[in-house]
Amino acid sequence: MAETVSVDGEAENVSGSELSYAEVEVKFYEGDTLADSFLDNVNNLGAGETWAFSVQYTGMGEDAAAITDYEIRAGTSL
């Protein structure tokens, strides 16, 4: 089975208002070098709701094994 890398988590809307759009960007790194970045998003996330996200790096095998770190950024639109 080929090695893969994914980041799974939950994001909660703590704004007190519905968000028309929310996204999570994950930047994948090989050492200090940015390998790539990918998004997951959701529409109409209600106040207090939690969203389960999953972002997968598209490289497999040796490419995936080279990933050493990641960074998560969340963004929204009201």
Image: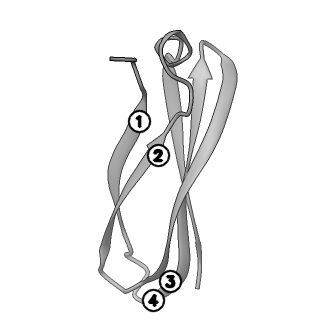
Q: In this view, does 42 lie above or below 56?
A: below
Could you give the CA–CA distance between mark 3 and mark 2, rounded to whole angstroms?
20 Å
| Structural crowding at the residue carrying mark 1, measured as other residues with C-alpha within 10 Å and reported as few (<14), some (14–19) or many (≥20) | few
Q: Kindly identify which residue carries mark 1.
A: 6
Q: What residue type is labelled 2?
A: Val
- Which of the marked residues, 4 or 2, is nearer the chain's N terminus? 4
Could you give the CA–CA distance between mark 4 and mark 2, rounded to whole angstroms?
23 Å
Q: Do the residues labelled 4 and 2 touch (CB within 8 Å)?
A: no
Mark carried by residue 18: 4
- Which of the marked residues, 3 or 2, is nearer the chain's N terminus? 3
Could you give the CA–CA distance between mark 4 and mark 1, rounded to whole angstroms?
27 Å
Mark carried by residue 19: 3
Mark carried by residue 34: none
Q: Do the residues labelled 4 and 1 touch (CB within 8 Å)?
A: no
| Structural crowding at the residue carrying mark 3, measured as other residues with C-alpha within 10 Å and reported as few (<14), some (14–19) or many (≥20) | some
Q: Kindly identify which residue carries mark 2.
A: 55
| Structural crowding at the residue carrying mark 4, measured as other residues with C-alpha within 10 Å and reported as few (<14), some (14–19) or many (≥20) | some
Q: Are marks 3 and 4 in contact (CB under 8 Å)?
A: yes
Q: In this view, does 6 lie above or below 66?
A: below
Q: Which amino acid does label 4 sit on?
A: Glu
Q: What residue type is labelled 1?
A: Ser
Disc 4 on helix, strand or loop?
Answer: loop
Disc 1 on helix, strand or loop?
Answer: strand
Q: Do the residues labelled 1 and 2 touch (CB within 8 Å)?
A: yes
Which residue appears at 39% of the width and 18% of the height? Answer: 3
On the image, which quarter does residue 75 sit in? bottom right
